[in-house]
Every structure is written in structure tokens, then in C-alpha cells.
Amino acid sequence: MRHVIALDVGGTGMKAALVGDDGALLHRARRATGRERGPDAVVENILGFAAELRAHGIEQYGEPAAAAGLAVPGIVDEERGIAAYAANLGWKDVPLRALLAERLGVPVALGHDVRTGGLAEGRIGAGRGADRFLFVPLGTGIAGAIGLDGRVEAGAHGFAGEIGHIVVRPGGTPCPCGQRGCLERYASASAVSEAWATAQGRPGADAADCATAVAAGDPDAVRVWREAVDALADGLVTALTLLDPRTLIIGGGLAEAGEVLFQPLRDAVRQRVTFQKLPAIVPAALGDSAGCLGAGLLARDLLNHTNRTEVTP
């Protein structure tokens, strides 16, 4: 059975799957990145995990994977196949595509984790059927994936979609990127957790606790939540003014609050638009499987492109 390897590397863990030609997940597995042992150990763990998946494919399906897709965080040069920088993993200019291709003996596609997750949401998730979409996961930070006719735009230098660093509060909270007042300092899950913990005087309080308190009508929680939603709406209206997406897909940990987030967010965006067309604002559909599914799509796209090239006169 022809299949591909799909690998999604996070800051602390890796998710993987073997994916069939029909998109079916034939096998799933997880591993730790081992980042506490340093960047070289992380790279070796990725390569070793991929080799295990290759061996499983041979054992179960009688043949090795035909290709592999790898999604990683940080700054990614997809064209050259290089993981340029990832603060959480400590690596810089790692030629991951070449290393993995050498280990597996098959073609490899390398992608940015959020753009790869956006590719999956756009093709087989919440954005399916939309010719233009914007995928925005609200997690530790905020990033974005710009979907155009079944693909995701990386930009000229690989930085397209970095909506988390739109300045929504000029002169506001400092951001590690060097600016002040960036969107992710107000509307990410970590920002809401920090604001709610401060309001409660409880270091362990997080965004999920805040959402529960909002649903219960707690005034402090409502204030913290409203500030985050207002900042998010400001950032999203800037993005939709520039990109004019048909569908706006919101994912990540904060989206797990459901209508506690989506009802006030839709209202806040609607209040801010003037001439712009209001997109459908919907929750992501694939959860934490999006990156892995997207990596599988990258690998299958690689095979399809190779096949087309081979038959072209």
C-alpha cells in the first residue's frame, strides 16, 4: 500500500502518522523532542523517529513510504529545505530536508508548522471549499496562514502571515520581537493566562480557567476576556482589510472556549468593519492533528508534482 510519512515537530513533542493515498491515517505515533539534551539531539530524534515509521510501513504494508513531509516551528526556508531558526529547539540553519531525505532515501518536503496546519485546515478542514482563507491559531503566540486556491503563501522571505506581530496597542507591552504592543501580547492563550493569573493573584490560573469564569459571569474574567477579544478583533480587521479572506479560521488553545470566544469575537469584528466584506469566522476543525495532516499533504503534493514532471514531454 503506497503511503507517506507525516511528521509534526513541536517545542516539546512530535506527532507522526503514516498516510495513505486516500488521505487515511494508517498509523499514528508520538515522541518527545528531547530538547533538554540540546539541538543536535532534537535533530537525531526526528531522524530516528522517521526511520521507525519507515520500518513500520515496510512491516505492515510491504513497502517503505514513498515520501515524507515534515512540519517544524520557527523560521523555515521551505524552498531550500532549511530550518533557519527555532528558539524553543535551539537550532539554526539546519538542513533538515537533506538530512531526512538521506536517512529515508525518499523525497522530503519541509514546511512551517502553522502554514502546514493551515494547509490542512484549508483543504480538508474548516476552510474546505474556500478559495481564500486565513488560519489563525491562538496558542503560546499567534501566527497565521494565508490560503490561496489550495496552497498557503509563504511570502518572499518566509514571513507571510505573522499576524501576531501586528501592533494593535502602540507603545504597549514589550514583545520579544523588539516591538511594543504586538497582538500576541494581548490575545494569545499565554497572554490571557498571564492577565487572568494577575487579576486573580493565582500564578497557576490559565486561559481555560478564565473562559470558565467568563461563562459564569465573573466580572474580572469578563474584563480580561473583553480586552483580549478587542485586541484580537483589531488585529483581524487589519488582516482582512489587507487580504480579503472568504473564511477566517480560528484555532489553537483559546478557540477551545467555543462560543465564549466566537460570539463576542464575531460581534467585535462586525462592529469594526466599514467597507470590508465580513468573512465567515469559524473554529478550526482538525485540532492538534492539523500539522501532522498538513505534513502528509506536503508529502503527497511532492509525489504528485514528481509524477506530473515525469510524464510531461
Image (spheres, grey):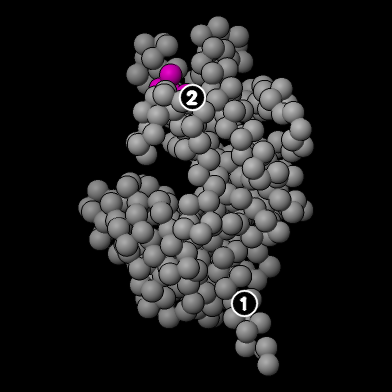
**Does residue 191 show up?**
no
Residue 35 pos. (x, y %):
28, 51
Q: Amino acid at mark 2?
A: Arg
Mark 2: which secondary structure?
loop
Residue ID at (54%, 31%): 254
Q: Residue furthest bottom?
A: 313
**Where is mark 2, residue-wise?**
169
Tag 1: Cα neighbours inside 10 Å, few (<14), some, or many (≥20)?
A: few
Q: Nearer the viewer, residue 167 or 154?
A: 167
In magenta segment, residue 160: no
Q: Nearer the viewer, residue 159 or 42?
A: 159
Specify the quadrant of the image occupied by residue 251: top right
Say whether disc 2 or disc 1 marks the residue closer to the N-terminus.
2
- Magenta span of residues: 191-195
Instruction: Name the main secondary structure of what is drawn in magenta.
Output: helix
Residue 184 pos. (x, y %):
47, 33
- In what quadrant of the picture does the C terminus appear? bottom right
**Where is mark 1, residue-wise?**
305
Residue ID at (65%, 53%): 147
